[in-house]
Every structure is written in structure tokens, then in C-alpha cells.
Amino acid sequence: MAGRNDKFEVYKDKRGEYRWRRKASNGQIVGASSESYKAKKDCEANMNRGRNKSDKWEFYKDKRGEHRWRRKASNGNVVGASSEGYKSKKDAQANAERQGYTG
């Protein structure tokens, strides 16, 4: 479930392109764009995908054995991914729920 006090930020990266990140009330980054966008409106559209039913969610273990998630659009492009690894799949799923995952 999304944190009620989470805040979204849109910013320019080192290349001058737009990215978004989602911060919890404690300042911890709990979500971020997996790519940059030349147009701010495209970045904001990705940020606001919400519960897009055609998206596919994948949960996997990374090279360090930590649980992560990624979200793919119907065309196969990754449109979101966890910004950190989690010790348990349950914690990775809880983070994905903040981004629109419904199980």
C-alpha cells in the first residue's frame, strides 16, 4: 500500500534529462524511475502510471541474493524497478505495493 505521506520529486540528472523518485516521510527513497526522459511530461506520465493493469511485475533475486522487483509495460520496456535490494521477498513486495503492485 502506498505511504500516505510519500512525496514524488521530478529532477534533472547529470545528462540534463528528467527522472522521478518517491520518498517516504523519513526521507528514504522508496521508488525511482528506471530510465531518464527528455521531456518532463513523459517523466511525469511514467511517475503517475498507478495501477496499470497491463503492466507485468517480476520479483527476482539479484547477484547479491537480495530480492528486487521490476515492472514492465505491455511492450516489454521496464517502466519501474526497485531502487534497492531487500532481505525478504515480502519486503520487496511491500515496496512494489507503494508503486501500484496489487498481487
Image (cartoon, rainbow, N blue to C red):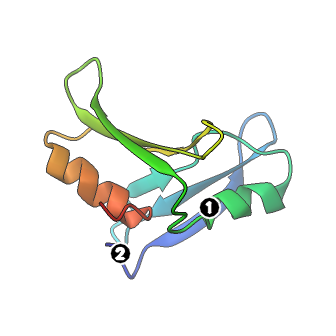
Q: Residue at x 85, y 45 (%)?
A: 38
**Where is residue 67 shown, x and y percent of the image?**
24, 36
Position of 32 relative to 99 (above/below): above
Q: Is residue 82 visible to us here?
A: no
Q: Which residue occupies the foreground of this view, 103 or 18?
A: 103
Q: The N terminus is located in which quarter?
A: bottom left
- Residue designated by label 1: 47
Residue 81, numbered circle: none
Q: Which residue occupies the foreground of this view, 33 or 59?
A: 59
Q: Earlier in the sequence, mark 2 or mark 1?
A: 2
Q: Is residue 36 left or right of residue 93?
A: right
For disc 2, the neighbor class at 10 Å (few under 14, some 14 to 19, many from 20) is some
Position of 102 relative to 60 (above/below): below
**Where is residue 52 shown, x and y percent of the image?**
55, 63
- Residue designated by label 2: 3
Position of 26 relative to 67 (above/below): below
